[in-house]
Image (cartoon, rainbow, N blue to C red):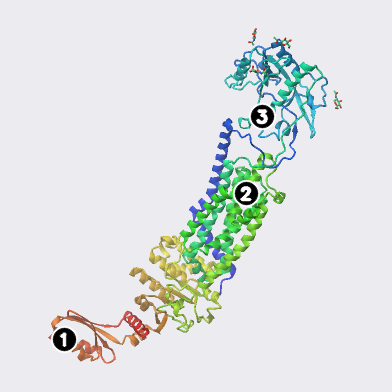
Amino acid sequence: MGKASYWVQSNALLRKNLTYQRRNKCQNCCLFVSPVVILFLLTVVEFYVKQSQNQQSEQSNPDFKPLNPVPNPPEWPPLIQVPSFPAVRSKALPFSDLPDASCLKNKSCPATFLITASNQSFGLGMASDMFPTLTSVNSSDIAELILGTKASLQDNYLSDPAFTEEIDLYYLQPKCKEGSFLSVPMKTKTFESICMQSLTLWRNSSSEVNDAIFEGNARVNTEKKPFDFAGAYDFLNSNSNIFNVTVWYQTNALPSTRGTSLTRVEQLVNLVSNAYLRFLNGAGTKILLEFIKDMPTHGYMNQPNFVAMMSTLLFIWIVVWLFPVILQALVYEKQHKLRMMMKMHGLGDQAYWTISYGYFAIVSAIYMLCFVAFGSILRLAFYTMNAYSIQFVFYFVYVNLQVSMAFLASTLFSNVKTAAVVGYLLVFVTGLLGNFLFVRVLQEPSFPRKWVIVLELFPGFSLFRGLYELQQYAFEGSVVGNGGMQWQDLNDPENGMKEVIIIMFVEWLVTLFLAYYADRALFSGSCMRKPSTSARKPSAQRNGTQVPSRRENPDVAEEMIGLTQPTSGTVFVNGLDLRTSMDEIYSMMGVCPQYDLLWETLTGREHLLFYGRLKNLGGAALKEAVEASLKNVNLFHGGVADKPAGKYSGGMKRRLSVAISLIGDPKVVYMDEPSTGLDPASRNNLWNVVRLAKRDRAIILTTHSMEEAEALCDRLGIFVDGSLQCIADARELKAQYGGSLVLTITTTPEHDAEVEDMVRYLSPTAHKTYHLAGTQKFELPKHDLRIADVFEAVEIAKTRLPIHAWGLADTSLEDIFIKVAMATASSSV
Ligand SMILES: *[C@@H]1O[C@H](CO)[C@@H](O)[C@H](O)[C@H]1NC(C)=O
Ligand SMILES: *[C@@H]1O[C@H](CO)[C@@H](O)[C@H](O)[C@H]1NC(C)=O
Ligand SMILES: *[C@@H]1O[C@H](CO)[C@@H](O)[C@H](O)[C@H]1NC(C)=O
Ligand SMILES: *[C@@H]1O[C@H](CO)[C@@H](O)[C@H](O)[C@H]1NC(C)=O
């Protein structure tokens, strides 16, 4: 049959892992559903936060600036906000001077301005002069045009939708020919504008103006729409000496962005100023307002955004979440000595490493893929804005780093619970530290960049930095429209993505190397252990195996199952040296340790399939071997084989462990107290299995139970203080060490002396070992005594003395064991 190849081992381990993973339905569900749920919640929260921000007009954010620098803001001509819902004659506004509602249908409604002044003739004069008729329809000078738009202002004036989206551009004239339009040539391109009539209406007082605007704007009219005026002027006490004017201006901007809508006021003020200048200086005078332009600005942070902050925290938690999961799985196999068990059944280090590592890396990759795919489906800018190839590289490197970190960390823990607590704590702390501490460092320009890089050596922080950069670019992308993070952006000195990927890549290689060697150091130590030498009562049955020189390992005797290194000497199994050919030896041996080393969620059949594959069984042979061994240990019937091992009783677990040690026909099987803790019925069952198995192979059995040893062993050895005191078969041992019979006689106390005399007569060297109220125990050396003589003597004594009870017994193995142990102890003192 031979040693299983690397591929066979890998295949066996992979199949076992997949089955194990499939069994852990709950964990799988949690693992893949939690990011989905978190992302979904995030979307909902983001939606509602946006909504409430829009409603709270007072909490607008006039300080908003984009994040990237704008050294040269665009120049836009000043625009008047003309109403989307122009004021017409209606129930709310029953004024005869307003246009008829029919203009709404053919979209020819004018932009209406209300005028008032303390001196009516002054006010009307101003009004008629504010909107001059263009002398030539073909004006090349934009500044001569009075332009308006229905488009709402955005967050900032860098992108006025009237120009960037080319919507709703109008030029205002006192009279419009239907359908006339004008080309507006600007630096970048020429825009088309439609003619819109400007209508100025006199009102008697400031309060009338105010009321009209208020009533029109109320959404109580039948149309359920506002009726808006384009603007209003109150000239107050203005005359040729005083220019005192109040301007009402219209804005369609959302309440949250009203701060920026001041840019809709300039033209209104300019118009009235021009009119006043002409009133003072005559028709030729004009002030030309050519354009409005933002100040150049360096990019800087917007105010901390709750959603953005929370989302980075949640993202980092989602990604790091896998760490404790992997760590737990690894420590579980270590804690339950399953790794050792697999190794002892022939699983090589290489196969273990490639499959375990690859397995967790692929699970992580699938997990991250779900994370990105689901985020993209929800159209979160974090995913859709940035180049997917960058995200892929970033997550790929991180996931590998994380898996190798988990391998390295697993060498430090021996208990799953500790590992889980530490792992989850690390997840929690990493997220919080990153989100509330490290982010401050990143945003503080005076903090030395060198130290940022030093901090990023902690993988949690480098992950955070990467996510942070993706988040920043996504946010910028969705605001300014520069397309998120692309590969060329990695050269941006502000962008930490490149350094983070390099750091994580190097750390990955280093950690993997360390983890591999830490693991080897940890396990190669214990894989050189010799189960046989720790035995107290070994039994080797066939000559194919030489139980080797006796006294090589006195120090390891204290180990319960002997997972330790030989301190000196060596062992030959089937002619192979323990020190050099351990892997070959593993492939031809089976082990049944004292404690049941089983996966709780795998069934008996799955255990046997896995170990069978490790022993290079395959196809029909494997199936046969598994069924046969299930039948042998009486686990085949009643569906027991397909129940998870965690649900087995103690006896079933022991029997499964024995079956595992026997599968694949190993040449040597080591068993450590196979029937410990079993009820007599199960124990008998198990002994039968072992008796059947020992026909074709050597079984080395270590036990404290003399009964077990006597029932199963052909040769017995007794270890005291780790050194082998004797080795022989049971009868020889009894002959050598148990050369006496034990006679127990109970009589009335006054006849004690007569009984003793009788025994002395039988055997002068008899030795009294026990005496209490008429019951006495004697040891009679076998060589000067015939058993028949004893019976005869007692029969005779019965006629004279009242003998209540008597017994004669050969020495038991237990007595021999105690004797040997006592002898050694006293000789060593
Ligand atoms: C009102 O304004 C006109 C000029 O438009 C001026 O001639 C007239 O004197 C003013 N009336 C008063 C009462 O100031
Ligand atoms: C308008 O001006 C352009 C050049 O600025 C000229 O080509 C065109 O003929 C003019 N049209 C009218 C109607 O004056
Ligand atoms: C303005 O006042 C005049 C009289 O001073 C009056 O005739 C006119 O109806 C008033 N106009 C409005 C719109 O109330
Ligand atoms: C401008 O008008 C307001 C309101 O009528 C008035 O209180 C203020 O004194 C006027 N300013 C001047 C300089 O006349």
Picture residue at 49% right of the left edge, 69% below the top: 341
Q: In this view, does 30 lie above or below 829?
A: above
Q: Nearer the viewer, residue 241 or 95?
A: 241
Q: Distance between the residues labelled 2 and 3?
A: 33 Å
Visible in this render: residue 696? no
Q: Do the residues labelled 2 and 1 touch (CB within 8 Å)?
A: no
* Mark closer to the chain start, 2 or 3: 3
- Per the model, the C-alpha gap separating discs 1 and 3 is 125 Å
Task: Report whether 586 appears left or right of 274.
Answer: left
Q: Which amino acid does label 2 sit on?
A: Leu
Q: Name the residue under label 2.
A: 442
Q: Is residue 735 above or below residue 583?
A: below
Q: Nearer the viewer, mark 2 or mark 1?
A: 2
Instruction: Return the disc, 2 or 1, that comes first in the chain's sequence.
Output: 2
Q: Do the residues labelled 1 and 3 touch (CB within 8 Å)?
A: no
- Mark 3, residue position: 261
Give the mark, 1 or 3, whose residue is nearer the N terminus.
Answer: 3
